[in-house]
Image (cartoon, rainbow, N blue to C red):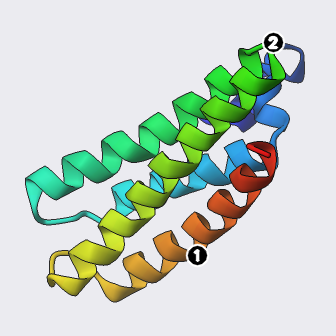
Amino acid sequence: MTTSNIPSRLLLPHYRLIAYQRCEELLLAVRAAEIRDASLRDQALRAAKSACLNIIEAVGRTGVGDKKRVFGIARGEASEAAGAVVLAAICGEASEAAAERCAQLGVEVVAMLTKLAR
């Protein structure tokens, strides 16, 4: 299922955030990296999923401070996910192309979430 398959009237507020959209791209890129180390692959996927989920949670929060805290958590998770793919490539367990793609998306997501967390 993709966002494009969901009628616009049913889209939850987080779908409007570019940070969330890029975070979904990061999740897909981490999955596509096919990290050969099962433990590292699991950790990278969990971090990428957690980043998405924390953005969703932050959008649902009502207190400004609480929103910022949860966006900060999402930032850390996105950084971990992208970094895990880079680490896998350094260890020869993922391609350099996958690492470059995840690193680029990671930089974008982290920058956006940094602004949202301020």
Q: Pick the quarter of the image with the N terminus.
A: top right
Q: Is any part of residue 1 visible from this angle?
A: no
Residue carrying label 1: 104
The residue that appears at 39% across and 78% down in the rendered structure is 99
Residue carrying label 2: 62
Q: Nearer the viewer, residue 93 or 74?
A: 74
x then y, percent, for residue 17:
81, 41
The residue that appears at 38% across and 67% down in the rendered structure is 83
Task: Please indicate whether residue 100 sits to the left or right of residue 57 in the image.
Answer: left
Asked whether disc 1 touches disc 2, contact meaning CB atoms under 8 Å apart, the reply is no
C-alpha gap between disc 1 and disc 2:
31 Å
Task: Please indicate whether residue 26 sits to the left or right of residue 71 in the image.
Answer: left
Q: Residue furthest right?
A: 9
The residue that appears at 60% across and 49% down in the rendered structure is 23
Dot 1: element: helix
Q: Nearer the viewer, residue 47 or 29?
A: 47
The residue that appears at 52% across and 41% down in the rendered structure is 51
For the residues carrying marks 1 and 2, which lies nearer the camera in this image? 2
Dot 2: element: loop
Q: How many marks?
A: 2
Q: Nearer the viewer, residue 113 or 105?
A: 113
Neighbour tally class for label 1: few under 14, some 14-19, many 20 plus, Cα within 10 Å: few
Task: Please indicate whether residue 83 sits to the left or right of residue 67 in the image.
Answer: left
What amino acid is at disc 2?
A: Thr
What amino acid is at disc 1?
A: Gln
